[in-house]
């Protein structure tokens, strides 16, 4: 999931800082899937419903549902998808700068992203059926084949694919029926948990190409924009970035507030309008997530002036450390949730409302952040990154 540096330069901080921060978004979004006996799960994206339907007063749970729907839900994975595509473009440019011909560049990209697939599949089958790495692997392979096509074609495909993103979002409204996405995560014993997770995970792996359809437009856009080096050099694009961010974040907040009011129990739209709302939120939420990356690039450029973050900027440095180990950080979340949440483990997933779930998700993310900082201090990569490099580079791990 981590990207590569720009050709002929140090690794730029903005993509890593964005990945590190978005892992928090993913943690607080994914924690809801692990909840059991938490009341009605009729909220969008497995979020527990608020209490608005039964009381006139707003509660902290209602406020959290509203805020996360407007700022977090459906924003993290599109941003990661954008960064995956951007990373494909960075790696292609780096290899070309070394003198590699297009066929060699394509081979490097295919090998790199194809070897993500078994890591994602193992994650889905053994830990978390909601895996996204497998879909990114399939997407990376597809982008490897498109790496030398024209920017105009990439943008046209991304625009056309937005329709699929909207349909994917509309389908999420149809799926709101009060049931959790992966009931195997709530099995009472470890053996039942593993058996169900294997079955559910295999289904998700088989479903990865379809899952990719909702994420591919952002990956294509990332590949196209990597050619502008907007994350490495955002300064010349500052006015355009601020305009795009204002429109994207504004639209995302509008649709996200609509879905948040539903999840907080304040509105109860008919299925048709709800599907239209979630379709719009899928598109505007993706744009909002990408806007986050562009704004982070501006912040890094202003504070760090294009250099990697160091201990003098501890927040950016810590986020950068986690972003450099984003695959390990993502997989570690599943390990920690498996220890903390199921009935057969520590059982923290029982009867958690939105506020408590937010605290658990944030705590899990903070643990991965701490681990990344410790590895950064020792100059060591994440274990998943080491495994991935060994798989696709063989013994050339240090290359």
Image (cartoon, rainbow, N blue to C red):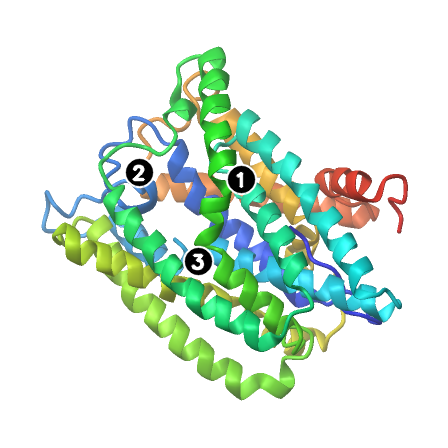
Label pair 2/1, CB-CB below 8 angstroms = no
* Mark closest to the chain's N terminus, 3 or 1: 3
Q: Would you say residue 266 is visible in this rendering?
A: no
Task: Look at the picture and state if 328 lies above or below 192.
Answer: below
Q: Which mark is residue 75?
A: 3
Q: Residue at x 69, y 60 (%)?
A: 317
Q: Residue 236 versus residue 350: which sits nearer the camera?
A: 236
Q: Is residue 285 left or right of residue 259?
A: right
Q: Is residue 206 left or right of residue 58?
A: right
Closer to us: mark 3 or mark 1?
A: 3
Q: Residue at x 44, y 20 (%)?
A: 196
Closer to us: mark 3 or mark 2?
A: 3
Residue 203 lies, in percent from the top left, at 46, 30
Q: Which mark is residue 364?
A: 1
Residue 327 lies, in percent from the top left, at 65, 45
Residue 290 lies, in percent from the top left, at 50, 67
Label pair 3/1, CB-CB below 8 angstroms = no
For numbered disc 3, what is the local secondary structure?
loop
Which residue position is annotated with label 2? 353
Question: For the residue carrying disc 2, how many other residues have a C-alpha within 10 Å: few (<14), some (14-19), or many (20+)?
Answer: many
Residue 181 lies, in percent from the top left, at 36, 34
């Amino acid at each position: 999931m981590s990207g590569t540096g720009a050709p002929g330069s140090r690794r730029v901080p903005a993509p890593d800082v964005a990945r590190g921060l978005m892992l928090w978004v993913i943690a607080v979004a994914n924690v809801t899937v692990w909840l059991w006996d938490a009341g009605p799960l009729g909220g969008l994206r497995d979020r527990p419903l608020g209490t608005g339907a039964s009381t006139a007063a707003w509660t902290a749970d209602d406020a959290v549902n509203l805020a996360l729907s407007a700022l977090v839900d459906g924003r993290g994975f599109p941003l990661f998808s954008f960064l995956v595509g951007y990373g494909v473009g960075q790696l292609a440019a780096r290899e070309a700068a070394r003198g590699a011909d297009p066929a060699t560049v394509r081979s490097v990209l295919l090998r790199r992203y194809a070897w993500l697939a078994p890591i994602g599949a193992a994650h889905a089958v053994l830990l978390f059926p909601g895996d996204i790495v497998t879909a990114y692997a399939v997407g990376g392979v597809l982008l490897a084949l498109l790496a030398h096509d024209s920017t105009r074609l990439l943008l046209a495909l991304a625009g056309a694919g937005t329709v699929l993103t909207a349909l994917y979002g509309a389908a999420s409204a149809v799926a709101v029926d009060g049931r959790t996405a992966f009931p195997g995560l709530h099995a009472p014993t470890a053996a039942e948990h593993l058996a169900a997770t294997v079955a559910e995970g295999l289904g998700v792996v088989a479903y990865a190409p379809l899952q990719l359809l909702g994420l591919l437009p952002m990956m294509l856009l990332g590949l196209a924009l990597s050619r502008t080096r907007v994350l490495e050099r955002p300064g010349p694009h500052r006015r355009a970035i601020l305009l795009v961010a204002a429109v994207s974040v504004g639209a995302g907040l509008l649709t996200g507030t609509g879905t948040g009011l539903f999840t907080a129990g304040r509105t109860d739209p008919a299925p048709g309008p709800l599907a239209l709302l979630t379709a719009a939120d899928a598109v505007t939420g993706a744009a909002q997530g990408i806007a986050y990356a562009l704004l982070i690039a501006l912040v890094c450029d202003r504070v760090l002036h294009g250099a990697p973050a160091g201990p003098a900027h501890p927040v950016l440095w810590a986020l950068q450390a986690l972003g450099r180990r984003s695959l390990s950080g993502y997989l570690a979340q599943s390990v920690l949730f498996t220890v903390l949440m199921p009935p057969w483990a520590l059982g923290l997933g029982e009867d958690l409302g939105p506020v408590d779930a937010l605290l658990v998700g944030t705590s899990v993310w903070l643990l991965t952040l701490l681990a990344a900082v410790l590895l950064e201090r020792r100059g060591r990569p994440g274990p998943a990154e080491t495994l991935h490099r060994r798989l696709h580079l063989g013994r050339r791990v240090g290359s």
